[in-house]
Image (cartoon, rainbow, N blue to C red):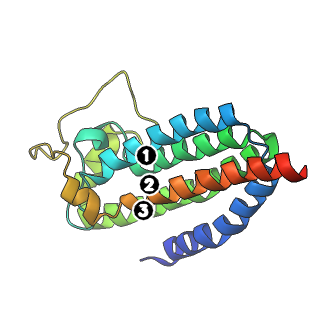
Amino acid sequence: MSQPRKFWMRWRVRVGYPVAILYWVLATPKPHWIAIGAVIAGLGLIIRAAASGQLRKNEELATSGIYSVTRNPLYLGSAILAAGFIVAGHSLWAGLLVAVYFCVFYYAVMRNEEEELRAKFGASFEKYAANVPLFFPNIFRGPKQPVDGAAPKVFSWAQYRRNREYKPLIGTIGAFAMVWFRMWFRTRYGF
């Protein structure tokens, strides 16, 4: 792993903990906002699951399925997941904090990962990158055939488990429990 990527990966996690604590303190959740946020977060989890069920990390370049409309579907799913927490928290300051954190760290991580993919897959990655957007999917273009001409990959539950994508699901359930607890705590103690 390159030095810049190590920096962003290491600090993404280290800064994430205080961001989560500040988010919790600043949040003013209400039941209907939690419910709406949970639906949005669920969409993010579905996108992450679809991507993870096709991704064979460090083995091959993923270019089919959801990877044919965005080069970073895992991070797109994470962004939608973060949006769910922004909505659930029902606080401008908590939402801005999460949004800034995500934009700063994840953009840098995406660019660093691209450098590694470019080094590993060369011309195949260049062709893929020229045809598929970095982050925001082109929903009007729709899915395309894999850039490398390979047969499209199908979703695999075994691959989903190998990529340990169940961890974000468990983490999201726990985090929404903490948002619900925050609502109860504010109602009970006024803070």
Dot 2 corresponds to which residue? 169
Quarter of the rendering containing residue 187:
top right
Q: Which residue is mark 3?
A: 167
Quadrant assignment, res 1: bottom left
| Residue 167 image-quadrant placement | bottom left
Q: In the rendered image of this protein, does residue 39 appear above or below residue 85? A: above
Asked whether the residues under the numbered discs 2 and 3 touch, taking CB atoms below 8 Å apart as contact, a structural biologist would say: yes
Mark 3 lies on a secondary structure that is helix
The disc at residue 45 is: 1
Where residue 141 appears, as percent x and y from the top left, is: 32, 24
Mark 1 or mark 2, whichever is nearer to me: 2
Residue placed most toward the observer, 28 or 152: 28
**For the image shown, how many numbered marks are present on the structure?**
3
- Give coordinates of residue 83: x percent, y percent: 60, 41
Q: Is residue 191 left or right of residue 57?
A: right
Name the residue type under label 2: Leu
Disc 1 crowd, CA 10 A, few/some/many (<14, 14-19, 20+): many
| Disc assigned to residue 61 | none
Mark 1 or 3, nearer chain start? 1
Would you call the spot at circle 3 few (<14 residues within 10 Å), some (14-19), or many (20 or more)? Answer: few
